[in-house]
Every structure is written in C-alpha cells, then in structure tokens.
Image: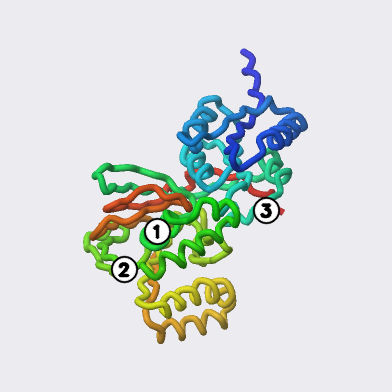
Amino acid sequence: MSSPEPRTPRAAVIVNPTKVDPAVLRAVVARHSDWHGWADPLWLETTVEDPGGVVAAQAVEAGVTVVLAAGGDGTVRAVAAALRGTGIPLTLVPSGTGNLLARNLELPLGDLEYSVRLAFEGTERPMDVGITSVVTVDGASEDHAFVVMAGLGLDADMIATANPALKKKVGWLAYVDSGMRALPKAKRFRLRYAMGDEEHRHHAHISTVLIGNCGTLPGNILLFPEARIDDGILDIAMMQPRTLFGWLDVWRRVAWENRVMRPFAFGRRIIKLTDAAAPATMTTMRGPRIAMQLEEPRFFELDGDEIAVIRSMTAWVEDDALIVMVPPLV
C-alpha cells in the first residue's frame, strides 16, 4: 500500500486590522508562501468581540503548519492561549504598543519582511505559558493564560487608567502618564499568599504584585534578571515602598542594578552589600506556583491588558506549552 501524499504546508495569518495594514501584510505572506511552495495562506481577522482566540482555534482546526499573529499584546496572548499544547508554532509580527513577548524573545521590531520570513525559515523554540485561575469581584471563576506578565495593584491600576488616545500616540509611554497620576493615590493592600505546595500562608502589605513568565517590561526594564522562558518557573515581585523615596529605590533596583550592574561579578557584590543595608522596598521570589487571597478586590492585568477586578488568584506554569518561531541558530 502506498503512503498518503504529504500535506502541503500552509500558514494562517491572524491580524488585528486596527494595528496592521492588512493589504501590505497579505502581500508579504503570499509572496513567501509562493516562494516556499506552500498553499495559499488562511487569512483571519480579530474583532472587538474576539481578540484572537476564536480565529486561532479555527486555524488549529484547519490543520495549518504555522500561525502568524499580527497585532498588539492582547492579540498575541489570545492566539498563544489557543495554540498552547497543539504543537503548532506561533510567529510574532510585532505591531502593538508594548510588543512584550517580541522584546523578551529579542526579535526585531518594525521589520515586517523579517518577521514574516521567520514563519517559513525560523527555528522552533518551546516556551512556558503562565496560567491564572481567578475569582472575580462577582464571584465568578475564570482561567486565563499569559505569556509575559500578570499584575495586581498599582501596575494594573496604571493599565486600567491609561489614556487610550495617548497610548495610540506615544505607545508604552502612556503608562508613565497614568502611573504619575496613580502614584499619589496609591494605597498599599493586604494579601495572604503561599508558594508551591506550602500549606502555611504568608501575609504581605504591598502596593503591587508582578508575576513574570519573562523578565523584561516595556521600556526595556529588566525586572526579573533570572527569568527564562523555558525554566518552568514563575518570578514574583512584591513591591512595598512606603514613600516616594521607596519607589525611587525600586526604580534603582530594576533600572540600574538589574540592567547595568548585575551582569558583572563586581556589580553583583555591590548589589549584595547595598541591598543588605537598604530598606525592604521589593521582595522577589521564584517558584512554579503561587496562590493569593486579597483582603479587598483589585484590578488584575495580563500582558498589559486589564482583565477583571478579582478577589483571589492562583498562578502556575505549563512547561514548554507553546512553540515560538525565532531566528535560526548560528
């Protein structure tokens, strides 16, 4: 008996038409498909009602070879959530404000031709996906996936109150504006948390919590220098500054120590000495799972998008659940 004919490879393109010129993108993808002998690409667009998850499921059902996501961080997160566990690679066409995952993968931004070429000639790289299970202020239970970062407190407040027009005009700098407005009104809040399989609950009085699957924030801010996209670990930062000077100390740690000093042995020795003498403005932890119970409801964000107001959250890692296309290894 003869073996069946191999299926002709086919790309699916999921595009947010408010972020990308569909005609230009369509022409580039069609040209590369033709060059490589692939079938005509499957073209799918996001809508206000569907940021990408439903159309990504359609691409999976169609049995495509690779999915290109052209849109902002919300589109990437929705498509990644639908692709996790399928083995179908995701190719990023960075097109939004933050481009958080693209920055953490050190992909070039603004090069449409290069981004599309990765779908056909790139290297497959597995990465972890973060999962959160939350209880909203209305008592509903919801599960959400994220690829870069989850946040509660001031971080989520900044995202929830960012000016949409300013965000469209100046990108991630709009969060600086909302942060400056939110900071004077920021109040610390109490929560109880447990790491991993701990039965004992710790207490914390903090301003914000960030849970990272990756290490870098908008503005090239390296918050978690030890984070790796495939380490099976979440990196957690709880920030508890009491004054403006406390926030300046947080900024010193993430913008100066992590980015400039930590790569060098001498710098790490200085960090160890200064951190021992400085007041505790930020506590960092690492583990595969964290559960948190909030004393009062707070805004919750994933990958730069406001999700809901929640009362509790559990976050964990799905190891190597997503495949992303990256530049070929040299």
Q: CA distance from mark 3 to mark 1?
A: 29 Å
Residue at the outermost right position: 35
**Is 136 positioned to the left or the right of 117 in the image?**
left
Residue at position x 22%, y 59% from top? Answer: 199
Between residue 93 and residue 36, name the one nearer to us. Answer: 93
Mark 2 or mark 1: which comes first in sequence? 1
Q: Residue under circle 1?
A: 157
Disc number placed over residue 305 in the picture, else none: none
**Is 31 positioned to the left or the right of 18 in the image?**
right
How far from the left and from the top, in percent, is residue 272?
46, 82
How far from the left and from the top, in percent, is residue 23?
69, 33
Mark 2 or mark 3: which comes first in sequence? 3
Between residue 86 and residue 96, name the one nearer to us. Answer: 96
Q: Residue under circle 3?
A: 108
Amino acid residing under circle 3 = Pro
Amino acid residing under circle 2 = Arg
Residue at the outermost top position: 1
Q: Residue under circle 2?
A: 188
Q: CA distance from mark 2 to mark 3?
A: 38 Å
Query: Which structural element holds mark 3?
Result: loop
Query: Which structural element holds mark 2?
Result: loop
Amino acid residing under circle 1 = Asp
Q: CA distance from mark 2 to mark 1?
A: 12 Å
Q: Is residue 200 above or below residue 25?
A: below
